[in-house]
Image: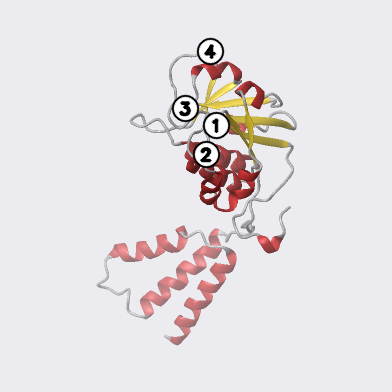
């Protein structure tokens, strides 16, 4: 688990779930895209990036784009073929926007991500094609699944870094906790009713509500006080505030 001093509300908590995620880029061409992918990986606590026959790229540019993901760039490994890059993976998942017919089963991202809870510890390789051509059909037989990230029919293709980020974020949201207080105590209906009565009392005694006020104003105040998702602590503060106003009036 991360040192609490280095974390903030909403940060993912590092936990050993036994799920090892490896990102594989097939024939990437642009240093900026590789850097953006490294940044997405760093955002989601994934560190293994494998490049299959990449074009020569400016490592310093990739590092600058990666922001705090420089460690991912420094540990990049290069492979001569996709088959070699995924040899140690127990599950190989290709990301493709191709909606045509093919023999490899295709799944939607959220459905596939939720299925990762099935089975024990394992290595999962996420395979992404090049920026220009995407994952080609010749790569499909090496994948157990093809995953489609839902998009509009007018533009089915996400860019490379977007695809990696969406995939990793979906996995983390399914299988990782994040830092933040869980709301343990919600006010009851009768407690909210007490606030409603207090607000209406103040509104009437201050003259805001009177015989000439439209009927919907009182209804609106009732709806607002009952609909607000207040914690018990917040409810106590607001009740005290309106109680003080009522006494002053």
- Which residue in the protein does label 2 denote? 57
Q: Is the residue under label 1 in contact with that under label 3 (CB below 8 Å)?
A: no
Residue occupying the point 32% across, 76% down? 208
- Which residue in the protein does label 3 denote? 134
Q: Is the residue under label 1 in contact with that under label 2 (CB below 8 Å)?
A: yes
Residue occupying the point 45% across, 64% down? 225
Asked whether 221 or 78 is in front, the reply is: 78
Question: Which label sits on residue 54?
Answer: 1
Mark 4 vs 1, N-terminal side: 1
Tell us which disc is closer to us: 2 or 3. Answer: 2
Residue occupying the point 59% across, 68% down? 233
In three-dimensional space, the C-alpha distance between marks 4 and 1, rounded to whole angstroms, equals 27 Å
Left or right, 5 with respect to 163, comes to right
Question: Which label sits on residue 103?
Answer: 4
User: Where does residue 76 sit, x and y in percent of width and height?
Assistant: 63, 39
Left or right, 220 with respect to 39, comes to left
User: Where does residue 107 sit, x and y in percent of width and height?
Assistant: 53, 25
Asked whether 53 or 231 is in front, the reply is: 53
Around disc 4, counting alpha carbons within 10 Å, would you say few (fewer than 14), some (14 to 19), or many (20 or more)?
few
Mark 3 vs 4, N-terminal side: 4
Tell us which disc is closer to us: 3 or 1. Answer: 1
């Amino acid at each position: 688990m991360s040192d609490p001093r280095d974390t903030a509300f909403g940060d993912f908590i590092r936990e050993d779930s036994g799920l090892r995620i490896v990102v594989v880029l097939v024939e990437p061409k642009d240093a900026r895209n590789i850097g953006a992918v490294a940044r997405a990986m760093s955002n989601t606590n994934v560190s293994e990036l494998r490049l299959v026959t990449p074009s020569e790229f400016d490592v310093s540019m990739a590092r600058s784009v990666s922001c705090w993901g420089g460690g991912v760039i420094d540990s990049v490994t290069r492979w001569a073929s996709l088959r070699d890059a995924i040899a140690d993976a127990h599950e190989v998942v290709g990301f493709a926007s191709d909606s045509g017919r093919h023999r490899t089963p295709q799944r939607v991202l959220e459905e596939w991500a939720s299925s990762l809870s099935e089975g024990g510890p394992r290595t999962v390789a996420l395979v992404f094609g090049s920026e220009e051509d995407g994952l080609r059909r010749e790569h499909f037989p090496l994948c157990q699944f093809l995953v489609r990230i839902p998009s509009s029919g007018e533009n089915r293709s996400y860019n490379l870094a977007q695809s990696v980020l969406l995939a990793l974020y979906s996995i983390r949201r399914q299988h990782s906790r994040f830092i933040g207080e869980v709301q343990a105590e919600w006010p009851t209906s009768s407690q909210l009713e007490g606030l409603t009565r207090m607000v209406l009392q103040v509104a009437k005694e201050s003259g805001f509500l009177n015989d000439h006020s439209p009927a919907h104003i009182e209804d609106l105040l009732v709806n607002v006080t009952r609909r607000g998702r207040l914690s018990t602590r917040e409810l106590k503060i607001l009740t005290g505030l309106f109680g003080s106003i009522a006494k002053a009036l």
